[in-house]
């Protein structure tokens, strides 16, 4: 049978082309831009875009009309990351951080709006963090959580807040949405996040994202200790060590690491 432009295979090719073009764009693309670049009718592009948006593969910005990749694509990508064994690649680098800092190091991913520890290297000595592999953490009160969500679109951050709330873990926990948004802006600016006794009294943590594209973290790594171990004086140095380690992990996995 001769393939036509209306055949199912052509529609699949168009859908994949749309996803590929949006993935390579830095700020998203409109229906008109995609129609022009892919040389397909706007009506056909609109139908495909609406379908992909409804299924969660794309997210449309209401103001600009531009489409960006949605969480469903990230969920598919997580399977690739698992196949490449993110934990196995990251573990030697985490161990190096622990050897240099004598602090506990965690590797976390975002899953269903929560930060999940998928690797941990315990610090030497008697002081131990009450954490474990598989533990799920709130994103608003942890450094790795803030690092994982800071680069998400505002609508996705709003969804996480709506679904999980902003429970008060300590007297220092951010419990107001506007304050969290401001805090995440700070995280994006400086490239690292801090949990200053916001999740557990007496504990201070610093975290950074591990990017898999210029503006999307696939994971986050963090150093945790007591407020006496992670001080306001040594925190900037720890953040720089973490950022360099995150870049190394990104390169090993073939990810893009620009920060």
Image (cartoon, rainbow, N blue to C red):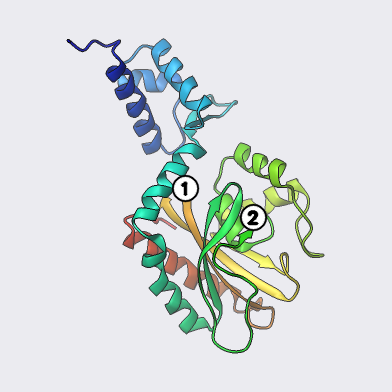
Q: Which of the two marks, 2 or 1, is nearer to us in this view? A: 2
Q: Can residue 50 be seen in this snapshot?
A: yes
Q: Residues within 10 Å of mark 1 (few under 14, many from 20)?
A: some
Task: Determine the residue positioned at 63% across, 76% down.
Answer: 129
In terms of depth relative to the viewer, which is nearer, 30 or 48?
Answer: 48
Q: Where does the image place residue 59, in percent across and percent down from the top left?
A: 52, 31
Q: Quadrant of residue 169?
A: bottom right
Label 2 SS: loop
Task: Determine the residue positioned at 69% across, 59% down.
Answer: 141
Q: Can residue 150 be seen in this snapshot?
A: no
Judge left or right: residue 36 versus residue 191. left
Circles 2, 1 touching at the beta carbon (< 8 Å): no
Residue tagged by mark 1? 215
Label 1 SS: loop
As drawn, 171 above or below 123: above
Q: Where does the image place residue 180, in percent across and percent down from the top left?
A: 70, 51
| Quarter the C terminus occupies | bottom left
Judge left or right: residue 155 versus residue 247. right
> What is the residue that sits farthest to the left in this orientation?
2
Residue tagged by mark 2? 139
| Quarter the N terminus occupies | top left
Q: Which mark is residue 58?
A: none
Q: Residues within 10 Å of mark 2 (few under 14, many from 20)?
A: many
In terms of depth relative to the viewer, which is nearer, 127 or 223?
Answer: 127
Judge left or right: residue 227 versus residue 170. left
Task: Determine the residue positioned at 39% across, 54% down.
Answer: 82
Judge left or right: residue 58 versus residue 257. right
As drawn, 227 above or below 257: below
Q: Where does the image place residue 121, in percent across and percent down from the top left?
A: 50, 75
In terms of depth relative to the viewer, which is nearer, 185 or 154?
Answer: 154
């Amino acid at each position: 049978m001769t393939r036509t432009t209306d055949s199912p295979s052509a529609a699949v090719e168009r859908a994949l082309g749309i996803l590929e073009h949006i993935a390579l764009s830095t700020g998203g693309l409109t229906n008109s831009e995609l129609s022009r670049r892919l040389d397909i009718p706007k009506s056909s592009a609109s139908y495909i875009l609406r379908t992909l948006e409804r299924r969660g593969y794309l997210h449309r910005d209401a103001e600009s009309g531009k489409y960006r990749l949605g969480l469903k694509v990230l969920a598919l990508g997580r399977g690739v990351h698992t196949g490449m064994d993110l934990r196995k690649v990251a573990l030697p680098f985490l161990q190096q951080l622990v050897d240099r800092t004598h602090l506990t190091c965690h590797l976390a991913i975002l899953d269903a709006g929560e930060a999940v520890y998928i690797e941990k290297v315990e610090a030497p000595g008697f002081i131990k963090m009450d954490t474990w592999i598989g533990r799920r953490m709130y994103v608003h009160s942890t450094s790795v959580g803030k690092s994982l969500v800071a680069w998400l679109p505002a609508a996705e951050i709003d969804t996480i807040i709506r679904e999980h709330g902003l429970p008060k873990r300590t007297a220092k926990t951010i419990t107001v949405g506007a304050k969290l948004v401001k805090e995440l802006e700070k995280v994006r600016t400086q490239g690292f996040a801090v949990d200053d006794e916001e999740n557990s009294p007496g504990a201070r943590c610093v975290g950074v994202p591990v990017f898999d594209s210029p503006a999307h973290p696939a994971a986050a790594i963090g150093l945790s200790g007591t407020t006496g171990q992670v001080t306001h004086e040594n925190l900037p140095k720890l953040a720089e060590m973490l950022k360099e380690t995150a870049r190394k992990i990104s390169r090993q996995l073939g990810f893009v690491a620009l920060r």
